[in-house]
Image (spheres, helix red, strand yellow):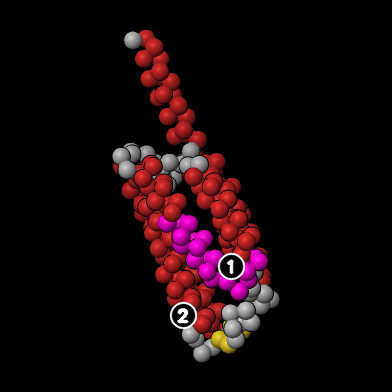
Amino acid sequence: MKNEKYLSDISEIKNMMNKSSRFISLSGLSGILAGVYALIGAWFAYRTIYFDNATMGSYQTLVISYEAVVKLFIIAASVIILSIITGLVLSVRKANKANEKLWNPTSKRLLINFLIPLATGGFFILFLIEKEMLSIIAPLMLIFYGLACLNASKYTFGDVRYLGITLILLGLVSTWFLGYGLLFWALGFGVCHIVYGSLMYFKYDRN
């Protein structure tokens, strides 16, 4: 009986340490929905790039007009905003269900470590857009977002680390296939989010 009590105490202490050092209110369902939003956004982007009268050339020598760039920016911003709102709503619901606070020292550290690589990449990509160097934007978006996930993963579920590594590798591979940036973008932000979100949902959220 004493051994069982000791094991129970150790398990409880371990759970308390995990809760204090990891943000566990992250919802796998939000990852799935973010992937769905990304695939829908990729479809609108595909329509804008390849069926818009404002663009010219083949997929390798594509010339995108300013109007098309604005449309693509609106599409990307819409996907990001929807993903953030969905993530917040589902995380709040999960935190309330577990009687935990969403905003705590761990979530602050998670957010800071996530935003540093993401903001760096965002400013760099804006600079490339201003210089009309559009061909490497999709690979860099994958790489910097992957770095953000990797940097923040130590404050949440370990699966986020593998998502980050996958996105970084996908971004690096896409640099060899610059004409297929939208396809890699859809694979990374769409398919990978759905796959890893599903794994996290069945692993952590179904209880």
Q: Position of residue 119 (x, y in %)?
A: 60, 59
Q: What residue type is labelled 2?
A: Arg
- Highlighted range, magenta: 175-194
x 51%, y 82%: residue: 50
Asked whether residue 1 appears in the rendered view, the answer is yes
The overriding secondary structure of the stretch rendered in magenta is helix
Q: Look at the image and tell me in which quarter the C terminus lies.
A: top left
Who is closer to the viewer here, 107 or 205? 205
Q: Is mark 2 on a helix, strand or loop?
A: helix
Residue found 42% across the figure and 56% down from its top: 194
- Quadrant of the snapshot with the N terminus: top left
68 and 109: which one is in front?
68
- Residue 95, magenta (yes or no): no
Mark 1: give few (<14), some (14-19) or many (20+) Cα within 10 Å. Answer: many
Residue 150 appears at what percent x and percent y?
A: 57, 48
Q: Which residue lies furthest to the right in this view?
A: 131
Residue at which label 2 appears? 47
Residue beneath the point at 45% across and 65% down: 38
Which of the two labelled residues, at mark 2 and mark 1, occupies the earlier sequence position? 2
Residue at the extreme bottom: 53
Would you say residue 187 sits in the magenta stretch?
A: yes
User: Residue 124: horizontal and vertical position, in percent?
Assistant: 66, 65
Q: Are marks 2 and 1 in contact (CB under 8 Å)?
A: no
Q: Which amino acid type is shown beneath numbered disc 1? A: Ala
The answer, for residue 118, to whether it is visible in the render is no
Q: Say if 86 sits above or below 103 in the image.
A: below
Give me the C-alpha separation between circle 2 and circle 1: 17 Å
Q: Name the residue under label 1.
A: 138
Q: Quadrant of residue 62?
A: bottom right
Residue at 46% across, 60% down: 191
